[in-house]
Image (spheres, rainbow, N blue to C red):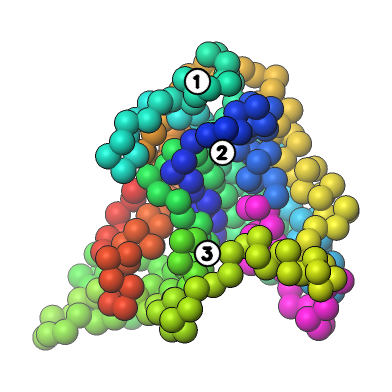
Amino acid sequence: MQITVAENGGVGRRSGYYENAGALRDIIQNHLIQILCLIAMEAPVSFDSDEIRQKKVDVIRAIRTIHPEQVHQNAVRGQYGAGWIEGEHVPGYRSEPGVAPDSPTDTYAAVKLYVDNWRWQDVPFYLRTGKRLPARISEVSIHFRPVPHQTFPPSALLDSRPNRLIIAIQPEEGILLRFEVKHPGQQMALAPVMMQFYYREAFKVRSPEAYETLLLDIMKGDSTLFMRADQTEAAWAVIAPILDMWQSVRPTDFPDYQAGTWGPEAADIFIARDGRSWTMPTFLQCREDLATCRVASESPQ
């Protein structure tokens, strides 16, 4: 399971806040863990706010504790340097107004979490977020397990990969299923294809912005999408060991990724240790023509 929230913007006018927060606090502690909860939660008895919020709390409480000596194996941080975004040169984080010239603040963070329950035992959840990445994109990529036995001949499986379900959140909302089919012709060979649904294409209307929905829920008294106090405390408990370790050990390699790239090399090494790689956000492959979206590449980013 991979959950990505990427931003191509920098800190802008928020340096005063961001210097004391960083990517782990700002995005992973709330936004990404909330997405994880929605993906991993069990079905509620009813569509009731208390029922739904309780199921999300159950997920957070089941997240495996990361002990101090395990932080380096389960978390990576980074900070952007100068680079190029959409053809425009942008400064590094330490050159932004209001940022200390030797700032240790993380603008990129990736963590690996496990949910210790019956359904998700030993399934890794990879969460990553960062500023000054190539695009503003949020999506969930669910990688299915390889089948235990392949009936196709080995020659047909040279480039075969497990199926994936992609939940697109930004900039387009939708659901995509990536799977493999037999390539037309006499030769037995598999090719990746994509089934896709996008709200904009299907309904021809703009989806409400996130805060539009939340403000309306406040006026309606609907607390479904809001965190309870115990949920907030549990989420902080998940990342507290990482924060403590990062604060005790000052980074010596910042800045360690160029603006306009997908983050530090350490993040690629981090996931490669498990024999995996970060998947390229699907929207980047499909944005030229949503109606005929197809898999352009399965290579690592």
Q: Nearer the viewer, mark 1 or mark 2?
A: 1
Residue that badge 2 annotates: 109
Magenta stretch in the rendered image: 31-50
Q: CA distance from mark 1 to mark 3?
A: 30 Å
Badge 3 marks a residue whose secondary structure is: strand
Residue at (81%, 83%) from the top-left corner? 46
Instruction: Describe residue 206's horizontal placement relative to residue 301 as left or right.
Output: right
Label 2 neighbourhood size at 10 Å, few (<14), some (14-19), many (20+)?
A: many
Task: In the displayed orientation, state which residue is furthest to the left.
Answer: 186
Is 84 placed above or below 192 here? above
Upstream in the sequence, badge 1 or badge 2?
A: 1
- Does residue 39 sit above or below 153 in this rendering? above
* Residue drawn where x is 78% and y is 61% of the image: 226
Q: Amino acid at mark 3?
A: Ile
The x and y percentages for residue 40 are 67, 66
Question: Quick one: label 2 or label 3, which is nearer the N terminus?
Answer: 2
Q: Work out how far the residue at label 2 is from the one at label 3, CA to CA, in angstroms.
A: 19 Å
How far across and down, in percent of the image, does residue 58 sit? 81, 62
Q: Are marks 1 and 3 in contact (CB under 8 Å)?
A: no
Question: Mark on residue 94?
Answer: 1
Three-letter amino acid code of the residue under disc 1: Arg
* Amino acid at circle 2: Ala
Q: Which mark is residue 169?
A: 3
